[in-house]
Image: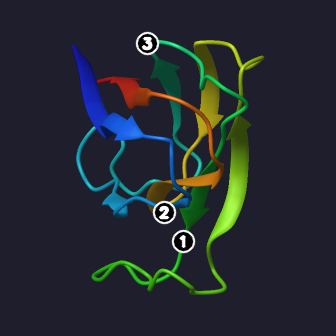
Amino acid sequence: MTMLTPLATALSITATGPTAAVLLNTTPFLGGQSHNALLDMDAAPAGGGIIAVQGSTNNIHNPPATGDASWTTLYTLNAASPLEQEVVLPQWVRLNVTTVGTGTINVRLNGVQ
C-alpha cells in the first residue's frame, strides 16, 4: 500500500518563509528518523525559486518553533531538481521558500507500507 503525505499543495513561491511543520508519525513514515520516502513534485520551482526541504528531530510532541536551531536543510529544490527523489526522513519536515520564484508548487512524500 502506498501512502502520500502532502508537504505543500499550491504553495505560492512568490514570498519567502517556511510552511507549517509536518510530524511524520504515521506508517510508513512513523518515527521519521532513518526511514526513506520518495519526495515528489508536479513541477520544479519556476522563475528562479529555491525551496529548502528542512527537517528537525527535536521535540516529538510539539513542532519546533519557526526559528528553532534544530531545523536543518536536508535537500534543496530548484528548477534543476528531479521531480522525484529518494529522501531520508527526520521526525518533522517543512518546506522553506528561501528565494522567491513564480507560481505555485505541490510537494508530497510518498511511502510504501
Q: Nearer the viewer, residue 92 or 54?
A: 54
Q: Position of residue 107 (x, y in %)?
A: 42, 30
Q: Position of residue 65 (x, y in %)?
A: 44, 86
Disc 2 marks a residue whose amino acid type is Pro
Residue at 47% x, 19% y is 41
Instruction: Check the image and report above or below for 99 versus 87.
Output: below
- Residue assigned mark 3: 42
- The dot on residue 57 is 1
Q: Is residue 24 visible?
A: yes
Disc 3 marks a residue whose amino acid type is Asp
Q: Residues within 10 Å of mark 2 (few under 14, many from 20)?
A: some
Q: Residues within 10 Å of mark 1 (few under 14, many from 20)?
A: some
Nearer-N-terminus badge (1/3): 3
Disc 1 marks a residue whose amino acid type is Thr
Q: Is residue 28 visible?
A: no
Q: Nearer the viewer, residue 76 or 90?
A: 76
Would you say 89 lies left or right of 28 here?
Answer: right
**In what element is the residue under mark 2?**
strand
Q: Position of residue 53 (x, y in %)?
A: 60, 48
Query: Residue 96 appears in which quarter of the rendering?
Result: bottom right
**In what element is the residue under mark 1?**
loop
Tell me the CA gap for discs 1 and 3.
27 Å
Tell me the CA gap for discs 2 and 1.
17 Å
Residue at 33% x, 57% y is 22
Nearer-N-terminus badge (2/1): 2
Query: Residue 101 appears in which quarter of the rendering?
Result: top right
Would you say 41 lies left or right of 63 here?
Answer: right
- Residue assigned mark 2: 18
Instruction: Check the image and report above or below for 68 versus 78.
Output: below
